[in-house]
Amino acid sequence: MLNEDMKEILFTAHDIEERTIEIAKAISRDYEGTVPLFVGVLKGAVIFFADLIRHIEIPIEIDFIATSSYGASTQSSGVVRILKDLDVPLQGRDVVIVEDIVDSGLTLTYLRDTLLRRGAKSIRIATAFDKPEGRKVPIVPDYFCFTVPNLFIVGYGLDYAEGYRHLPYVGVLKESVYTHE
Ligand code: IMP
Ligand code: MG
């Protein structure tokens, strides 16, 4: 069973749900009178995205973008490839980018700059988890559920080798999971 792979559970489904509702209320207040476009970053953000938007109390639209970094050497330059682009024009839109986790900040810096260049009126970032110790570029999420230490976490959208995304909680894997490949 997958829960036997976990060394430690950091956040239960209940912990995450409580914070997600608080954030959704804050976003609903901050964007009252507008129709923000929520942009989910595939694949990691899907779980948080679906939970977050169901607690938004104002009209919104949604869209998705998929990115991948070019690899270790170019990652530090912040080069990100768009694998699936948005369907909706951004001109004049208030955009809320929804991410699973902000680590180095390179993905979000690239996305924010790209969407602004395309004419978005404003951009804010909502993330389930923030790992500030991992930062290579200064970027601060506007909304986040939890700050996490500099550990590799899985669950609630976050994967290890594409696994564990569907777990409703977030935790740290046992060392044996990494060594038994
Ligand atoms: P960055 O902020 O550009 O470094 O990249 C953020 C992306 O790296 C996230 O969307 C995740 O896909 C991945 N990532 C960063 N930290 C973790 C982690 O602890 N577990 C799983 N994926 C992570
Ligand atoms: Mg990701």
Image (tube, rainbow, N blue to C red):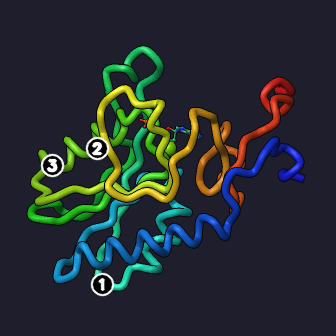
Q: Residue at x 64, y 42 (%)?
A: 153
Residue 175 in the image: state x and y as whole percent: 81, 29
Q: Nearer the viewer, residue 177 or 13?
A: 13
Residue 51 in the image: state x and y as whole percent: 52, 72
Q: Is mark 3 within 8 Å of ligand 1?
A: no
Q: Residue at x 63, y 66 (%)?
A: 15
Upstream in sequence: badge 2 or badge 3: 2
Rendering quarter of residue 25? bottom left
CB contact under 8 Å: marks 2 and 3: no
Query: On the image, numbered disc 1 is attached to which residue?
Result: 58
Q: Residues within 10 Å of mark 1 (few under 14, many from 20)?
A: some
**How far is the residue under mark 2 from the one under mark 3?**
8 Å
Query: On the image, numbered disc 2 is attached to which residue?
Result: 111
Above or below, 110 against 55 in this view is: above
Query: On the image, numbered disc 3 is attached to which residue?
Result: 116
As helix, strand or loop, the secondary structure at mark 3 comes to: helix
**How far is the residue under mark 2 from the one under mark 1?**
24 Å
Residue 71 in the image: state x and y as whole percent: 46, 22
On the rendered image, what quadrant is the C terminus found in?
top right
Q: Residue at x 47, y 31 (%)?
A: 133
- In the picture provided, is 114 more to the left or to the right than 98? left
Upstream in sequence: badge 2 or badge 1: 1
Q: Is residue 166 visible?
A: no
Rendering quarter of residue 144? bottom left
